[in-house]
Image: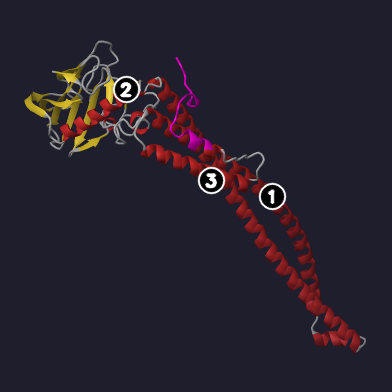
Amino acid sequence: MIWLTVSQLSLPTVQAAQSCDQISCNKDTQDESTFLNCSKEKQSCWESNIREAQGAAQTLNSTISILSGQVRVQELQIDQTEAEINSLERQVVDLANRIVGLDLSLDRLTTVLVRRIDEHYKTGRTNPPFMLLLSDTFNQFVINYKYIKLTEKQTAEAMQRAETQKIDYDQQKTLKEEKQAEVERKKLALVKQQQTLNKQRSEQQFLLQETKNNEARFQQELAKTLAELQAIQSIIAGKGDESKVSDVKQGDTIASIIVGSSPCSTGTHLHFEVVKDGTHRDPAGYLKGVDAVWNNQPDTSFGWGGNWEWPLNNPAKINQGYGMTYYARVKRSYGGAPHTGIDMVSKDQGSYGVRAVKDGSLYRGSIKCGGGFLRYVKVEHKDDASMSTYYLHVNY
């Protein structure tokens, strides 16, 4: 197995890539604010490169350029998230220290306030006329009266300071909790970003391995998949040359998979489609659960959500799923459109029979595709006239 690196390839965007790399960002030597601004500028540069590559002619080099740019953008986003987490964690520590200080200050204020209130209570029990009678002189009365007023003022000020301190304490505590929650959100985001990066790197290596850095091979496979998509769209639009054969029951054998390559097919597989009201549906939502063998790298496994029997004996090895698969998303094999069905073969070697998944009317058809004719069968379902299943790359 030969692994190629991006540096071994002659990319059309090498000069642009070098200009992005010349933007020097270092999270170890720059403060968070400087680093974040720098890395966002660098991210913007790489995103511009990606858009340029996406607008260029679809080649192996441009596809690798897009993947390389996406990897670099994801790496920058991870660095940014780590810097944000470090900044937030420092803020949490600072807030925790501030809260401890406020707590101690509030305790001291509370002690002072209790003493002031006690003194105010004692002095406040003596009214001015009574104080005058108790005083030896009028001057003594004035001094005592002023002392009472001063005590009242100091008590009110202590109460105000305590209230302000309490509000500040509550605000800082709430802010600390918010920062801690934000740290946890950022950490979860970081895990997802790292998973995305690992997936992008895996897809990049898979592309290099699969194509062997061969532009002709890449273009040949691309032409077949694009032609297949166009043929499928024509079939669904009723442009295939087809005729009704008979009514069939669920489980009846209706065709056999073509062994090897065939028009618009790179190898042995059944392309299974579900169409309702003229719209493609994910077959995984209709097929019953099985212990599948996953042959769809670098994509991962997915689940089954229905109760239909499978169109194959001993199902199934899955070669490609429905939707924006690796071939649709990375290689843009379908012109940016999703894969419209599931590609599969039986787990039993040499078992190529294809069976109807539901009762209905069987049609056999073909359509021009890639210099030949793509053969298929269709079953219009008896229990739902708006639904049909299609079975492509078959003999009948």
Q: Which mark is residue 94?
A: 1
Q: Secondary structure at mark 1?
A: helix
Which is nearer the eye, 26 or 86? 26
* Percent of width and height locating residue 2: 46, 16
Does the stretch in magenta take in 8? yes
Residue at 76 percent across and 70 percent down: it is 117
CA gap, disc 3 and disc 2: 40 Å
Viewer-nearest of discs 2 and 1: 2
* Percent of width and height locating residue 288: 27, 27
Quarter of the image containing the C terminus? Answer: top left
Residue located beneath label 3 in the image? 41
Q: Residues within 10 Å of mark 3 (few under 14, many from 20)?
A: some
Left or right of residue 91: residue 285:
left
* Percent of width and height locating residue 95: 67, 51
Q: Quadrant of residue 225?
A: top left
Check disc 2 and give the amino acid type. Answer: Asn
CA gap, disc 1 and disc 3: 30 Å
Residue located beneath label 2 in the image? 319
Taking 266 as reference, is 276 above or below it? below
- Circle nearer the N terminus (2, 1): 1
Check disc 1 and give the amino acid type. Answer: Asp
